[in-house]
Image (cartoon, rainbow, N blue to C red):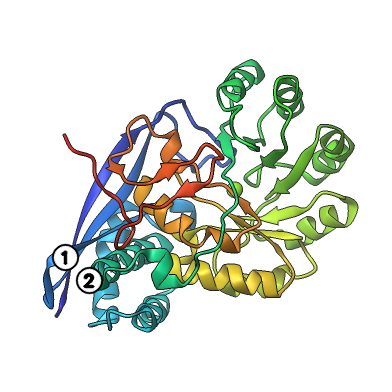
């Protein structure tokens, strides 16, 4: 066995409380994420860093991740330290076991970092994705309208805001934010709306300059999503309904956009493939994240040139990101360090 993995569960405080409409989502004042270190006997001086977010909604917990890591590692075997080797390793991760996107993501990111460090190539060089990436928006969780508006003032440097909806005062919240912020608003109900409420809101959302509506209804209710998209001039974006590349075909003709996340689909390689396939199928592509550190955000930024919209702000929601090396430009575009692999390292101290 050439690969060795250790993992660490991190409990990280948030800058501001962060709530969404799904009740299973326990993020409030702190979040839990899993960081891994991957070593390869062939390259004893190199450590690949990865991260996977344990989201119960998608079948990952801290315990399930620890349980499937050995199985996934065995499936990967001894990958070639090349771009083709990474693609082959990703395919073996995908086929080793269904679901468990967070666990697969942690190993897949660590493999990219390790191979980058072994070969002296940045992750964007390994992926051959040097293109420009869109700026990230900034996400505001559910709260009282005045509190959300106050957070919007603090986030006014961002060229777009993502507003969590599905609470009791969505319209009041959007009105309060619009009163102090001029840019596009992207709204995400996290499955929390009813069809009659959503369709009644459409004229108001258009008036308020909403750019897209993410996952208004439960993941399996493609009938409801199609019904609303047929009545909406705004794109409906599937998130909870679009977990892996295998979900895309069923969404054609249902919604106009899909939200791809590394923690859902299983890492860098699967996200790249899912974004490319989504564009082939005519979707607008949104690249999202969980409440993750700079490790997962850097890995996500590496494929962001394949996205039309970017929501990579998980590390910005943390009070103290334990990693350093990823920089947000004045234009709100992520800049990866010009260094091998992900270009991120543990913050000293
Ligand atoms: Mg979402």
In the rendered image, residue 167, in percent from the top left (x then y), is placed at 66, 31
In the rendered image, residue 245, in percent from the top left (x then y), is placed at 57, 72
Instruction: Identify residue for label 2.
Output: 118
In the rendered image, residue 42, in percent from the top left (x then y), is placed at 13, 78
| Residue at x 31%, y 66% (from the top left corner) | 107
Residue reaching furthest front? Answer: 338
Observer-nearest of 316 and 244: 316
Toward which corner of the image does residue 29 lie, by quadrant?
top left
Instruction: Identify residue for label 1.
Output: 46
CB within 8 Å, label 2 to label 1? yes
Observer-nearest of 279 and 126: 126
Question: Please, is residue 74 above or below residue 241 in the view?
Answer: below
Q: Is residue 99 visible?
A: no
Toward which corner of the image does residue 80 lie, by quadrant?
bottom left
Toward which corner of the image does residue 317 lie, by quadrant?
top left
Q: Where is the N terminus found, in terms of image quarters?
A: bottom left
In the rendered image, residue 287, in percent from the top left (x then y), is placed at 57, 55
SS for dot 2: helix
SS for dot 1: strand
């Amino acid at each position: 066995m050439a690969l060795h993995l250790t993992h660490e569960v991190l409990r990280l405080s948030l800058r501001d409380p962060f709530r969404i409409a799904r009740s299973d989502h326990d993020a409030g004042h702190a979040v839990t994420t899993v960081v891994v270190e991957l070593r390869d006997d062939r390259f004893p001086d190199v450590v690949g860093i990865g991260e996977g977010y344990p989201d119960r909604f998608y079948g990952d917990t801290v315990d399930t991740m620890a349980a499937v890591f050995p199985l996934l590692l065995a499936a990967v075997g001894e990958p070639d330290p090349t771009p083709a080797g990474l693609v082959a390793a990703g395919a073996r991760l995908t086929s080793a076991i269904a679901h468990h996107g967070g666990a697969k993501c942690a190993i897949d990111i660590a493999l990219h970092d390790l191979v980058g460090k072994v070969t002296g190539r940045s992750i964007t060089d390994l992926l051959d994705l040097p293109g420009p990436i869109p700026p990230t928006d900034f996400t505001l969780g559910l709260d009282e309208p005045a509190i959300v508006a106050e957070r919007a003032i603090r986030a006014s440097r961002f060229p777009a805001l993502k507003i969590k909806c599905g609470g009791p005062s969505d319209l009041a919240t959007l009105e309060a934010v619009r009163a102090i912020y001029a840019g596009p608003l992207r709204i995400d109900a996290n499955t929390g709306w009813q069809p009659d409420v959503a369709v009644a809101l459409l004229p108001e959302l258009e008036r308020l300059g909403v750019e897209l509506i993410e996952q208004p209804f439960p993941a399996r209710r493609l009938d409801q999503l199609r019904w609303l998209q047929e009545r909406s001039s705004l794109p409906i974006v599937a998130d909870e309904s679009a977990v892996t590349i295998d979900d895309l075909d069923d969404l054609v003709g249902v919604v106009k956009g899909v939200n791809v996340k590394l923690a859902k689909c299983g890492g860098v390689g699967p996200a790249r493939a899912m974004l490319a396939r989504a564009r082939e199928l005519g979707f607008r592509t949104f690249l999202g994240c969980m409440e993750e550190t700079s490790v997962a955000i850097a890995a996500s930024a590496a494929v962001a040139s394949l996205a039309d919209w970017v929501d990579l702000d998980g590390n910005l929601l943390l009070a103290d990101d334990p990693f350093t090396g990823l920089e947000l430009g004045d234009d709100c575009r992520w800049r990866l360090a010009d260094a091998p692999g992900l270009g991120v390292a543990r913050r000293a101290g």
